[in-house]
Amino acid sequence: PKVTYVEYSGTEREIELPSGLSVMQGAIDHQITGIDADCGGECACATCHVYVDPRWLERVGPQGSQEAALLDFAALAQPNSRLACQIKMNDRLDGLVVNLPEAQH
Ligand code: FES
């Protein structure tokens, strides 16, 4: 499945990721600017904050409780904020678009 990362600068990069890989790991593997992932995917740092394109929110699903608690502390969190390490790619998410926030720029 493909995901499009929209960097804060406006640069868009569409990348094919294997199913099961997190949106965070895909960004790290492809040197996307704007995902720091300090905790390595443990849902403990909130530096993999992304804004999910509204068209995809329903498929991505709601924030988990730990995720929501972390996002409370993230700069400029919005209702469509998610932690990219908690989004695992699968065929239903083919075409997903995520926007990277200014704070990780
Ligand atoms: Fe740390 Fe996602 S990588 S919360």
Image (cartoon, helix red, strand yellow):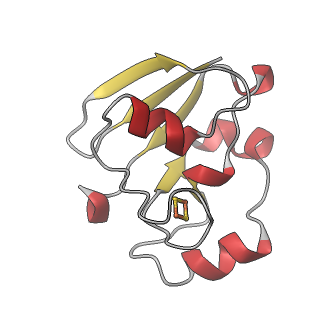
Please identify the quadrant where the N terminus is shown: top right
| Position in image of residue 95 (x %, y %) | 61, 20
- The residue under the point 62% across, 66% down is 43
Give the quadrant of residue 58.
top right
- On screen, residue 102 above or below 13: below
- On screen, residue 58 above or below 14: below
- On screen, residue 40 above or below 88: below
| Position in image of residue 81 (x %, y %) | 56, 60
Please identify the quadrant where the C terminus is shown: bottom left
Could you say which is closer to the camera, residue 91 or residue 11? 91
Give the quadrant of residue 33.
top left
- The residue under the point 41% across, 32% down is 29
- The residue under the point 65% across, 33% down is 21
- On screen, residue 16 above or below 72: above
Give the quadrant of residue 38.
bottom left
| Position in image of residue 9 (x %, y %) | 20, 41
Could you say which is closer to the camera, residue 11 or residue 83? 83
* Residue furthest front in the image: 40
Q: Is residue 2 left or right of residue 29?
A: right
Q: Is residue 74 left or right of residue 56?
A: left
| Position in image of residue 17 (x %, y %) | 58, 21
Number of numbered callouts drawn: 0
Q: Is residue 50 left or right of residue 6?
A: right
Q: Is residue 9 left or right of residue 47?
A: left
- The residue under the point 61% across, 65% down is 79
